[in-house]
Structure formats: structure tokens, C-alpha cells
Image (cartoon, rainbow, N blue to C red):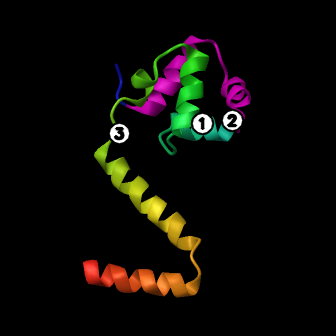
Amino acid sequence: MENDLGAKVKKLRISHGLTQEDVAKALDVTPGYISNVENGRNLMTLRMLSYYAELTGVSLDYLAGSVDKEYQKTALDNEIIQLVQKLDTDKKEKLISTLRIWA
């Protein structure tokens, strides 16, 4: 069993005779999103994983497996960046002050 989510997604898609377009339509996403998942550029959200598991008849545990520690670090960094981008200037300055204290 592969630990790579993208490889699992692709293998399941092919074994079910589905195209990336078929999967994209079923999950209400773009074929490019599916391609990015299969090539390891994106991970599916929990909701997408759940839908994909149902679509392909596998358990969510099989799909999710364990998340690579390096990806977890990157995902945390990306989440921080996304949250910070939503803050106004005053809140960003307060956040920087707080981070300086912690660092």
C-alpha cells in the first residue's frame, strides 16, 4: 500500500475506469485540481477525501494514511500566511510584536 496520497488517488481513479474529468465532475472541482492532487502539488481537504473515498468505495483511513511531517510543516506555514493576509495593518503589527516575544 502506498503512503503517497496522490499515487493512491490516481491508482483508484484508474482502477475504477475514471478520468480526471469524471472525478472532478463528481467532486465539483476542476480537473486541474485532481491533477495537482495526483502529482503531489495539493492535498485534498477532509471533505474531498471523504467524497473521494465514497466515490471509489474505500475507507477514509485508507486514503488519509499518515501525513508526511514535512508536509505538515508546510501546511502550517501556509495556514499562517493565509490567516495573516486577512488581518488589517494594526493587527499585523500586534502579531509581529507577539511573535518577536515568542521568538
- Residue 67 numbered tag: 3
Q: CA distance from mark 3 to mark 1?
A: 19 Å
Q: Nearer the viewer, residue 55 or 19?
A: 55
Q: Which mark is residue 31?
A: 2
Q: Residues within 10 Å of mark 2 (few under 14, many from 20)?
A: some
Judge by depth and name the residue closer to the eye, 11 or 51: 51
Does the CB distance between marks 3 and 2 fall below 8 Å? no
The residue carrying pointer 1 sits among few (fewer than 14), some (14 to 19) or many (20 or more) residues within 10 Å by Cα, namely some
Q: Secondary structure at mark 3?
A: loop
- Give the mark toward the camera: 3 or 2: 3
Residue extent of the magenta highlight: 4-30
For residue 55, side relative to residue 92 (left or right) = right
Query: Rounded to the nearest whole Å, what is the CA distance between mark 2 and mark 1?
Result: 6 Å
Q: Is residue 86 left or right of residue 7?
A: right
Could you tell me which residue is drawn at 29 percent across and 46 percent down? 69
Measuring from the top left, give residue 47's x and y in whole percent.
57, 35
Q: Position of residue 23 (x, y in %)?
A: 66, 26
Q: Does the segment drawn in magenta span residue 18?
A: yes
Is 92 above or below relative to 8? below
Callout 1: SS: helix
Q: Earlier in the sequence, mark 3 or mark 1?
A: 1
Q: Viewed as shown, does residue 28 lie left or right of 6?
A: right
